[in-house]
Amino acid sequence: MRSFLPLCLAVLLLGIGLWLAPRPRTELNEQQRLEVFDFVWRTVRDSHYDPKMNGVDWQAVRQRYEPKARAAHSDEVFYRLLNQMVSELKQSHFVVYPPQHLIARQHIHGGLAEGEIGIVALLVNRQVLVTRVQEGSPAAQAGLHPGDQLLAINDRPIPDWLNELRNHWNLQFPNRPISPATERFLTYYLLLTLLNGQAGTTVHLRYRNLADEEREIALTRQPVKDTTQPLGLLPPLPLRLESRRLNEGIGYLAFNAFLPAVMEPVRKAIHKLRDAPALIIDLRGNIGGIGLMAGGIAGLLTDKEIPMGVIHLREGTIPIVAYPQPGAFRGPVVILTDETTLSTAEIMAGALKESGRAVVIGRPTPGYALPSKLVQLPYGGLLQCVVADYRTPKGRRLEGIGVKPNIEVALTRNAFQHTPDPILQAAVDYLRKAFPSPMRPAP
């Protein structure tokens, strides 16, 4: 096995933050651009799990793009061409981050985690809705609620931001229409980029609340409390973990990444909830991480071995297996998903659904399930490239398909009139119906 662990981390894919970053002070010359071009082309060729390059003639791709790279009149055009080149493979997790890109700049500065206002906002029926508000956050203190519709950020209307996102995609991938799932996913990360930033700075919002009243507020970003340790070229990332009991004693666990920092806290949380009548694991907002950790965490949910799928590398295969662990939870399990459930989180949700160990409730995941790595580029910037394929125990691919919930929940503004979290409420309703009250504690 290679020295790196397969990473399935998707962060701000496809240049969302590009227009927010300053231009570099000096442009690369032609020789430097050709050096970067050759590095990207060779790294992708040598790292891809499939020697046949997913059926793409990679040499022919080079012959088409190298003259364009030579003729590029600016770094902006040059790096856009590199992204067009890697997109010829038609797979996620192939991204070139220019030196001025948010990801590359934050890697240099030491981290992405700075300040936040405490909300999650998603694209729902062409509207941007607040779907979650963190307790005690600046947004909560200002009176924002799930179901509120964002109308403008920093005095710029939401439709303008969405149009720029779509135009940016069309410019970067002119022959590849954006899919609805990809647009929802990229909108989510665009909103994260706009709403969060340096601690102590201010973001201005105009929104419509559930009473149909328009309001304007200015929120000061508070420091992110917990972050992960750097992993390879990945900078520190915000770390979230929540564990509690819901009505009737149902256990609830949420975490936002499959990284070493969460393993022990997740184990302890599941151990404390092992007597709950059922357990809801919330993988919404989970960006993925180390692929093999899907098996490690799933082992805390079973008393028998569960195949979780296979990672296919060029050199061979790596099975992911959930081995029973002491103190495992043995009661009913529900997993919550949506378009912000990515990579390793998709692997865990899909495998446990396929095995019958868990019921998946929520919205479909985007299908970004290919293990990848980050590589530093000459003269700055980063390359994210695929190194492996993943198949479920039954041989199914999640890439480009995602995980379809057993019970799909439609989000609407009206749904938030009845509950602050329609997906979580649907999970509780399912458990009440499938395991009538009084729910019995797990054995």
Image (tube, rainbow, N blue to C red):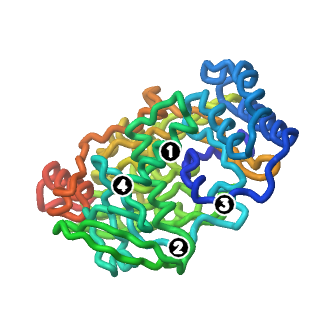
Q: Is residue 351 left or right of residue 26?
A: left
Instruction: Give the foreground label among 4 and 1.
Output: 4
Q: Residues within 10 Å of mark 1 (few under 14, many from 20)?
A: many
Residue 15 location in percent, x, y? 58, 48
- Mark toward the start of the polypeptide (3 vs 1): 3
Nearest the eye: 412 or 403: 412
Which amino acid type is shown beneath numbered disc 4?
Answer: Leu
Q: Is residue 218 left or right of residue 201?
A: left
Q: Quadrant of residue 236?
A: bottom right
Label 2 sits on a secondary structure element that is: strand
Nearest the eye: 413 or 19: 19
Residue 104 location in percent, x, y? 68, 56
Report the residue at 16% width, 52% height from top: 435
Q: Which residue is mark 3?
A: 22
Which amino acid type is shown beneath numbered disc 2?
Answer: Gly
Q: Which residue is mark 4?
A: 122
Residue 73 location in percent, x, y? 75, 40
Q: Which mark is residue 193?
A: none
- Mark toward the start of the polypeptide (4 vs 1): 4
Pointer 2 with pointer 3, Cβ within 8 A: no
**Disc 2 from disc 1: Cα separation:** 25 Å
Report the residue at 36% width, 54% height from top: 122
- On the question of residue 206 being in view, the answer is yes
Q: Residue furthest right?
A: 31
Q: Which mark is residue 343?
A: 1
